Image (cartoon, rainbow, N blue to C red):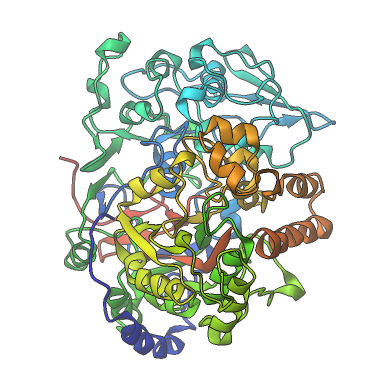
Amino acid sequence: MVRRKKALGIVALAAAFMLVLAACSSKTGGGGATPSTGGGATSTGPITKGGVYRTAVEDFGFTGAFDPTGEYLGSAFGLYSQLLLRNLVTYNHIGGVKGDAIVADLATDTGQVSSDGLTYTFKLKPGVKWGPPVNRAITSKDVAFAFQRIDSKPLVAQYDFYYDGTVVGMDGAVDKPADQISISGITTPDDSTIVFKLAKPTGDFLYRLAMPAAAPIPPEVGKCFTKAGDYGRDLIASGPYMFQGSGDVDVSSCSAIKPMAGFDPTKFMKLVRNPSYDPSTDNAQDRHNYIDGVDLEINTNTDDIFNKIATGDYDGSFASVPPAQVLQKYVTDPTLKPFLHVDSGDRTLYIFMNLLTPPFDDIHVRKAVNYVINKAALLKAWGGSTSGQIATHIFPSTVLDFGSQSNYDPYPSPNHAGDLNAAKNEIKQSKYDSNGDGVCDAAACNDVLFINRSSGARVNMTPTIISNLASIGIKLKLRELDTSTAYTTVAVVKNLVPIAANAGWGKDYSDPYTFAVLFLKSGINCEGAINYSNVGISADLAKECGVSSQYDAAGGSSIPSVDAQSDQCQNLPVGQDRTNCWIDFDKNLMENVVPWVPYQWSNVLTVTGKSVTHYEFDQFSGILSLCHVAVSNKATIS
């Protein structure tokens, strides 16, 4: 995803493209222009074992260098949970609602829960071993060590908020190495038993245990990596696949460990079967493991990726978005339609604004940006309605059903093309318009840093965003970055990025809370934030992150917080009252906080070649399900 390219004549192309969608809208099951149904599974021939899924991506885009303790990228979640790691509980890695269900994995069942909901006890299955070079039985202490790593501040566990304040003894990361940390709420009475004591009933705790950071890590190797991300090059497999060359690594001492040959973050990831994996300890319906491996390479040329799928050099895409001209071919050509898979992504694409940085420290400016953005043009830049639908608020309908309020849109405009007059009326009320003409005339509106990615549809939509904001006097200074650099740049609080469009968010698991976390104080990690807008930042946290002066200039304690409202929703049982609470939460964000411009609820588009004989989608990670994919090629990992 690092290739720069000029914006195409995308508006004209997409306009023509939109005309053909109606002809394709009735086809489902992964072969048409609407989200796949029935789990998104398709088969085109006999399903046999063997072969390699050969694919490419422009840039891995990892947020934590592929160390599961800190990594927070959806495609990485797929590689972990489908192929490399086994958690106490997991998913069956299929699409649709059934794909959101929790199933046992390392544990014999989904746990024994005490009557008060505060104690979870798990028994590990016998016979589950670490892959090379560790090659020993996985124990409950290995699971506990994963939580010790989450609690180690230097490792920057980006979603530690799911465990802090929930598991007794986890009250925030501590500045110690993982092997020196003890968590009172996690006990291991024997090698096959682990017990979690919770501070409060947490109905979604099993979902949290299924996240990659909670997967076991062997302490004898994990303790050797005390800096964020370093373990990613030497991840020890517990799942059916491992990095090529894992068995060649010497783990007799920390100083002897060298990076595994199968993963070069700038070039490739090569996964092969784990010889220590015993299929009898797993459920084939959760992981069929048809393929012999995955050959995932970096190819910075998006067009070349899809050309190679067409020629058979690649078997299919991985996480790359098909360019609009490629998408048009697959939607309009009857011979290609069966190879386009459209699945619900449970995700929102958005432009964020930083409440600490001028001119976005003024809510009227943030509202004006919501009014002025031409969301219809942005959707066209992504390829039209096949890519998703225009977002009018934050939570996608697949995560939170607004029911009778499904048409909620606090910033309406004709055909979603933007309302310049409404935007100017907001600017007039801001502190950045001295003459009241609805155009920002303050110095703070000149050369405003705007970060976006350097590839794909985001490049195509950038001119629209720049033009829209210029119409209200905000002159953006564009900086296009590859995916990883963009994320790591906006995630550092002291970088004070004013506005960016590089990010999107898919649910972590099937609950609205997994969107709410983007706006909580707990989502502000100085070096690995996900609350990029700094909603609810406190004076102490601003000081810790080195932005005290900006905090004071932005109004300090007047910066809105939604933590209490989130807690209120979290404490409600599943039902309509809880749903209504989250709807009010979304409305409050859109009307009274205004940290984002949500512009698309997106689908996941996957293109496969003729060699793929079985396709499946993984609803958890939001990518194709490699543990269920089958191919007819005879390729091997070289």
Q: Is residue 635 left or right of residue 125?
A: left
Q: Nearer the viewer, residue 128 or 349?
A: 349
The x and y percentages for residue 409 are: 66, 75
Query: Which residue is nearer to you in this view: 491 or 360?
Result: 360
Q: Quadrant of the N terminus?
A: bottom left
Q: Is residue 235 above or below residue 145?
A: below
Identify the residue shown where x is 54% and y is 69%.
Answer: 369
Q: Quadrant of the C terminus?
A: top left
The residue closer to the viewer here, 532 or 558, is 558
| Residue 575 image-quadrant placement | bottom right
Foreground residue, 27 or 585?
A: 585
Q: Residue drawn 62% across and 46% down?
A: 517
Q: Residue furthest front?
A: 435
In the rendered structure, the answer to whether residue 301 lies left or right of residue 88 reads: left
Q: Is residue 385 left or right of residue 591?
A: left
Residue 611 percent location from the top left of the image = 25, 61
Q: Is any atom of residue 62 visible in this view? A: yes
Q: Is residue 460 above or below residue 122?
A: below
Residue 109 in sight here = no
Query: What residue is shown at x 59% (from left), y 76% (from top)?
Result: 436
Percent coordinates x, y for residue 267 in the rendering: 20, 43
The correct choice, above or below, for 422 with respect to 179 in the image is below
Residue 256 at what x, y percent from top left?
25, 12
Q: How many marks?
A: 0
